[in-house]
Amino acid sequence: MSGIVVIGAQWGDEGKGKVVDVFSENADYVVRFQGGANAGHTLVVNGKKTILHLVPSGILREDTICIIGPGVVLDIEGLVSEIEELKAAGYLKNPKQLQISEQCTIIMPYHKQLDACRETAQEALKIGTTRKGIGPAYEDRASRRALTFGDLFSAESTRHRLATALPEKNALFTGLYNAKAYKSEDLISWAAPYVESLKLYRSRDASMVIHRALKTGKRVLFEGAQGSLLDVLHGTYPFVTSSSTIAGSACTGLGIGPTTVSKVVGIMKAYATRVGAGPFPSELLNDVGERIRTIGNEFGATTGRPRRCGWIDLVALKYSIRLNGLTNLALMKLDVFSGLEKVAVCTGYNVGGEIIHEFPASTEDLEAAQPILEWMPGWKEDLSRVNTLKDLPRAATNYIDFIGNHLATPIDVISVGPAREQTLWVKPLFST
């Protein structure tokens, strides 16, 4: 089996899109297994930036088949727009390159409205939702009120699902939020043109397609969204996303067995970021944090929101390694540190006077945690022009070695810029 899971090892925005794009040169399939359009993967090829939200990051390789799996919640309006932009840029010439599972949950307009109403009503909590209807859509799936992509191809099925979903939604809108109600026929009319545009990409059994690919020796990348510390069960709850972001979700989100996975690659930045509220022990609320944000272009690909920046947190990364069973790591954005006289690494927490080196299960304890930092010399050299590992300055290799030794997990890929060619390989991902 040649199934490799690629997930974010921090709070998301680690650079998974670039890694998957680079890895997909040697992949036959790239499969997205969870999340929705709240994720943004930024790719830079030949100096041109492409931002993807739902389409897997292997789509820029014309020989790679991309699948949106059942665990994804699908914004059909946004997906059609994304596909049109890809076609305009010369990609996705063959519709068979993209397959959408008909088991995907559909994000309806009322999901987005409910998301916005709740965020406004719960302003004090400030979870930081993108208001794209992700959470409400997952709720409907769990409560068996969701429409699937397959339902949209049958007006009868769509009406039946809406008859189950709308009474509750409309009661909330009109009774609690003073918002507009929805009618089934209006929603069917709204969906019709998008369904027509997407019919070429419909996959009746994506799980079977993936199973056959693996069984016949094809190389398959399973692409996650967001980051492990935003997992709905194991993240910094309640400041989390609405899906399971850890590696095990690849199996549940796609309908494959765990024995099909041969490697789990965790993507991490040379520093740490997070968006929205929630505990962030190593956060930098100073000029260094602002410098990292500016040089690293740490603004959301989906929302444009500035990301909170801090030193790399090895306590959190060790937790992520444990959660996911990470076998390999990719270190991104090392070039952002160029010009800093010294850099720091968080190796532990001080929680109420107690020194701990394991990620606390309690969000309250994490909020109270003060970082224990170890300082290392920085470097002045511009790493974005480095082509080989031996050309890295000693201070940079010392930093990499310190992280790798502390985490006891091999760092096989180092990124020194956003472009494909700005990638340094310690070891190839796929065995030859």
Image: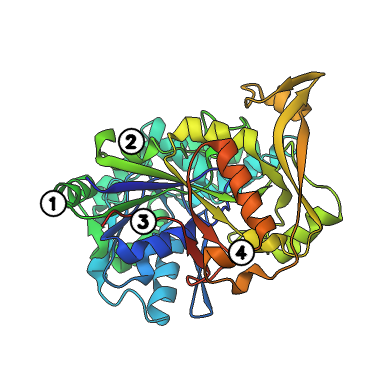
The answer to which quarter of the image holds residue 87 is bottom left
The picture places residue 153, in percent across and down from the top left corner, at 25, 55
The tally of labels here is 4
- First along the sequence among labels 3 and 4: 3
Which image quarter is the N terminus in? Answer: top left
Residue lying farthest right?
286
| Residue highlighted by disc 3 | 188
Rounded to the nearest angstrom, the CA distance separating label 3 from label 4 is 57 Å
Side (left or right) of 70 relative to 128: left
Nearer the observer, 416 or 22: 416
Q: Position of residue 298 (x, y in %)?
A: 68, 59
Disc 4 to disc 2, how far (Cα)?
A: 40 Å
Between circles 4 and 2, the one closer to the viewer is: 4
Using the image, determine if residue 141 lies above or below residue 29: above
**How far across and how far down the image is residue 349, in percent?**
73, 28
Q: Earlier in the sequence, mark 4 or mark 1?
A: 1
Q: Residue at x 83, y 47 (%)?
A: 285
Quadrant of image for the C terminus: bottom left
- Looking at the rendered structure, the kind of residue marked 2 is Thr
Identify residue type, mark 4. Answer: Leu
The residue labelled by disc 1 is 216
Q: Which mark is residue 392?
A: 4
* Callouts 4 and 2 close, C-beta under 8 Å: no
The reply to whether discs 2 and 1 touch (Cβ–Cβ < 8 Å) is no
Residue 179, can we see it? no
